[in-house]
Image: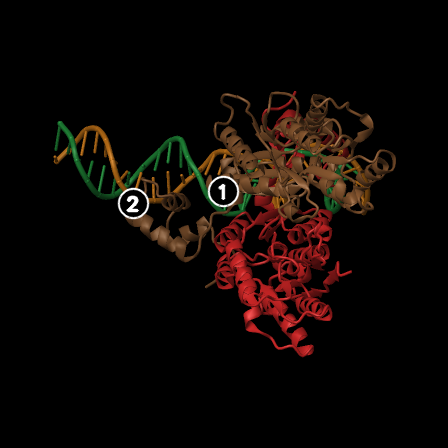
Chain colours: A brown, B red, C green, D orange
Amino acid sequence: MDQERPVKLSDISKALNLSVSTVSRALKDSHEIGEETKKIVQSYASKVNYRPNLIAQSLKEMNTRYIAIIVPEISNSFFAEIVNGVEFVANNQGYHVVIYQTHDSTEREINIIRDVARRKADGLLLSPSTNQTDVNEVMKSIGAKLPVVYFDRVPSDNYCHKVVCDNYQAAFEATTWLIQQGKKRIAHMAGPSGISISIERLAGYSAALLHAGISVDPNLIRYSNFLAREAWDNLRDLEEKYQPDAYFASSDRLSFYCYEAVQKLPEPRASEVKIVGFTNAHFAHLLRPKLSAIVQPAFDMGKIAAEMLLNTISKKHKDIEYGFIKLPAVLKNTE
Amino acid sequence: MDQERPVKLSDISKALNLSVSTVSRALKDSHEIGEETKKIVQSYASKVNYRPNLIAQSLKEMNTRYIAIIVPEISNSFFAEIVNGVEFVANNQGYHVVIYQTHDSTEREINIIRDVARRKADGLLLSPSTNQTDVNEVMKSIGAKLPVVYFDRVPSDNYCHKVVCDNYQAAFEATTWLIQQGKKRIAHMAGPSGISISIERLAGYSAALLHAGISVDPNLIRYSNFLAREAWDNLRDLEEKYQPDAYFASSDRLSFYCYEAVQKLPEPRASEVKIVGFTNAHFAHLLRPKLSAIVQPAFDMGKIAAEMLLNTISKKHKDIEYGFIKLPAVLKNTE
DNA sequence: TTAATTTACGCAAACGATTGCGTAAAATAG
DNA sequence: CTATTTTACGCAATCGTTTGCGTAAATTAA
């Protein structure tokens, strides 16, 4: 009844006294197989619950019908939504999506990229971590022509596909809003220096300050890598020395660190200091006092990135026209 | 320089005038290959950046060195932590982890399970969605002997590997705590009826009430599937008709829905109604008023589940001794 | 020096599916 | 009734690796 071992084409061919090739063709409804035979094969195959071995198929066809997406942390709502957008598009086109997380370790990231290449994923969606040179090296060393679309954090050159949100604009608006609330000493909790999003957000922040006639104080700008320690040290130092009246946080994690740090301050500062930060966290709006949020169109970013990727996969090495999509982010929960 | 096409064994064999088998063996340091030859092959291979094609390897070896984990939603911190635990163990043993999400759709879940089987994952970690009969059917129909470990939501029979937390105990403690706060009309926002976690948590809730001499009012017990609508309808109905003085929520999502619903009530109810719910959300402790949290040892659950799975994978069809691990959850943020 | 053993490698089958090509039988054309 | 085309199938190579087995040459034993 229930076969111990998955049934394969040769099992069917033996049982039906047909050749393997005939069975294979019959199952894909080839015109060169008699209607009668097709019926027999198909019904028998479904009776014994035949499922083609995807490994064998992949080896033959030289494609795997799946794409990989590498993110720092799946629990981060921003990335989770991106993944959802990717899945939405990919599944509709018969592709599966395999999710990897780097936990912000470049070493892990490199290993994963290598593995993705060796497992012959048909394409890769990547938001490279801090140290770009290493990653670029790997991306080159994997000789395979692996189509890649970058998102969120992207390389600076123009010879790749990229999907981002308008970080400059978002940072400008967020900072401007804080200024409109009467804030003047606005600290900027930035991500790792040197990567695209940090640069653009810092630029937007600075431009907004200058536009409002406020000078940019380097002391109020703090870069943190992804260790909690660094962020906490920066926050403590800022509070001790400069006591900002507002924070602009550049990532989900930093937003919540800021929020927590501020909540621990003695009143009335705790409720006076305003915070606006990049976050797609679902329940951010439940916080009191409010955490104003710059929400990125993550789902759409994922959708677009997946479309770009599947597009380049399908028309293989044809016209190499690189796409660069930039979507607007919105400022929410400002009242 | 940079090869267009990944280099394969036969490329090396031609270049070095050796047979493919010799190259293969030389690369895995076989004793039946001369030291001299090995050096030549290995150095050449690394020069041209040879990476074995995992598809071909998998086909030959009949294993893929990866395991799959299927979760409802990766953005849910509970599941994200489980995944992290799984990755921790699996990566250490040379396995990759492939993550799939069902978005609480049984249809998607079944498709994914089928795909996992066809792609020949070496094992599967599964927290089956609502409708267990369908899923069981599929699990049977995939003739392949695919090792499976269930976690969180698990089948009732004893012929499978299971990892759960002590839902009964956790629910009992949570409810008891609410009673100790002086609450008497404690509503229970339960997950889908019929699945293991709902049953156990309801049992713990009921036992705690009875133990305190409070009768169990069926009107205060509401089951919600995973549509937001149902939960909101239940909450509105409860507020309109019964005005509970506390809520015990059975999942991450329900906890936050409760919290939001209660916050929207007019004072003083908004700050009087207490909520305790299952959640592993990182920033739950930032909420004011507090959301008391039943925190599951998700990372450990993932680790244990992965260990059980890799264990059964390694000793293949040998002694089939099924494991059932139950870990304690802790009540936090109660002040 | 001859026989037995070891060393170092190549041949070919296998994993499961796909597909170009060849070819009997059947159908159609002339 | 023969010649040509079509139909319906089988053979065998292929995708990239792995591995059992066979075998020359080199080494050791007797």
Instruction: Name the residue located 68 percent from the left edge and 52 percent from the top edge.
Output: B281
Report the residue marked by disc 2. Answer: A34
Instruction: Name the residue located 80 percent from the left edge and 34 percent from the top edge.
Output: A244
Could you tell me residue C4's position as x and y percent?
Answer: 74, 47
Residue A137's mark?
none
**Towards the viewer: B133 or A43:** B133
The quadrant the N terminus of chain A occupies is bottom left
Viewer can see residue B32: no
Instruction: Name the residue located 59 percent from the left edge and 52 percent from the top edge.
Output: B70
Protein chain holding label 2 = A
Instruction: Say whether residue B239 is left or right of residue A127.
Output: left
Give the secondary structure at mark 1.
helix
**Towards the viewer: B206 or D20:** B206
- Residue type at mark 1 is Asn
Report the residue marked by disc 1. Answer: A91
Q: Image height check: is A14 above or below A228?
A: below
**Towards the viewer: B269 or A106:** B269
Q: Residue furthest right?
A: A241
| Figure quadrant of residue A32 | top left
Viewer can see residue A127: yes
Could you tell me residue B284's position as x and y percent?
Answer: 70, 52
- Residue type at mark 2 is Gly
Q: Image height check: is A83 above or below B82?
A: above
Tag in front: 2 or 1: 1
Q: Residue furthest bottom?
A: B213
Q: Image height check: is A171 above or below A2?
A: above
| Figure quadrant of residue B295 | bottom right
Q: Earlier in the sequence, mark 2 or mark 1?
A: 2
Instruction: Say whether residue B137 is left or right of residue B286.
Output: left
Could you tell me residue B195's position as x and y percent?
Answer: 56, 65
**Towards the viewer: A10 or B294:** B294
